[in-house]
Image: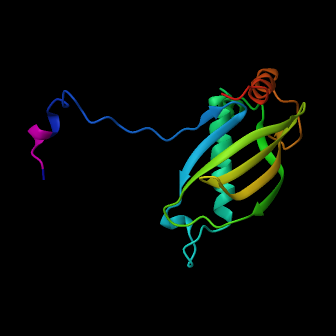
């Protein structure tokens, strides 16, 4: 057990930097977000459990919103509304396996007043593993559709129309 003097000493001059959570990048009109397959993501056979693709796709969409400076938490706290998936279709193509590096690619394919359609692909290198086509709607906290805030629609429009870099 450390002595009380050790607990009151000043912090180190050059402390070890604290890591930050991973984030995605933009590549033209695509958002790319990397994940790694951990043991907890796999089933008994050592392949990724199917529901984990939904989690990875959600993380990628949340990161996309953060990068577009869309503050979901503030919108919820101010009772303005929230995004919710209203429909999703998944197509499983190949299994991801333990320790694979997977990149989630997200594009916005259609923008409406209250919703947007997106397409997401999980890839291991050039190999497509799972595809998702989905619709995300902006809703009131009571669950009714409502128009997306104008600055948010503008951010999505700018993202959709970016040229490849």
User: Is 123 on the left or on the right of 41, as rendered?
Assistant: right
User: Is 87 on the left or on the right of 103, as rendered?
Assistant: right
Q: Where is residue 155 in the image (x, y as percent from the top left)?
A: 75, 24
Is most of the magenta stretch helix, strand or loop? helix
Whether residue 13 is situated above or below residue 143 in the rendered picture: above
Q: Position of residue 13 (x, y in %)?
A: 19, 27
Whether residue 48 is situated above or below residue 137 in the rendered picture: below
| Quadrant occupied by the C terminus | top right
Res 91 visible: yes
Q: Which residue is drawn at 81% across and 51% down?
A: 133
Q: What stretch is highlighted in magenta?
A: 2-6
Considering every residue shown, the one lying at the far front of the view is 126
Quadrant of residue 83 within the rendered picture: top right
Q: Which residue is drawn at 68% across and 42% down?
A: 61
Is 154 inside the magenta-drawn segment?
Answer: no
Of 57 and 79, the residue lying toward us: 57
User: Is 1 on the left or on the right of 22, as rendered?
Assistant: left
Q: Where is residue 46 in the image (x, y as percent from the top left)?
A: 54, 74
Quadrant of residue 42 within the rendered picture: bottom right
Whether residue 162 is situated above or below residue 92 in the rendered picture: above
User: Is 136 on the left or on the right of 104, as rendered?
Assistant: right
Q: Position of residue 16 (x, y in %)?
A: 27, 36
Q: Residue at x 55, y 67 (%)?
A: 97
């Amino acid at each position: 057990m450390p002595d009380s003097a050790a607990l009151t000493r000043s912090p180190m001059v050059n402390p070890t930097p604290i890591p930050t959570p991973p984030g995605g990048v933009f590549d033209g009109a695509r958002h790319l977000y990397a994940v790694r397959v951990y043991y907890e993501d796999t089933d008994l056979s050592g392949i990724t459990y199917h529901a984990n693709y939904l989690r990875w796709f959600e993380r990628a969409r949340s990161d996309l919103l953060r990068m577009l400076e869309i503050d979901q938490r503030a919108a919820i706290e101010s009772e303005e509304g929230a995004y919710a998936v209203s429909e999703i279709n998944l197509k499983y193509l190949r299994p991801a396996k333990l320790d694979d590096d997977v990149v989630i690619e997200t594009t916005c394919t259609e923008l409406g007043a209250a919703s947007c359609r997106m397409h997401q692909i999980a890839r291991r290198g050039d190999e497509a593993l799972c595809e998702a086509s989905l619709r995300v709607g902006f809703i009131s906290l009571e669950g009714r559709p409502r128009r997306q805030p104008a600055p948010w629609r503008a951010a999505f429009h700018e993202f959709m129309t970016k040229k490849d870099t």
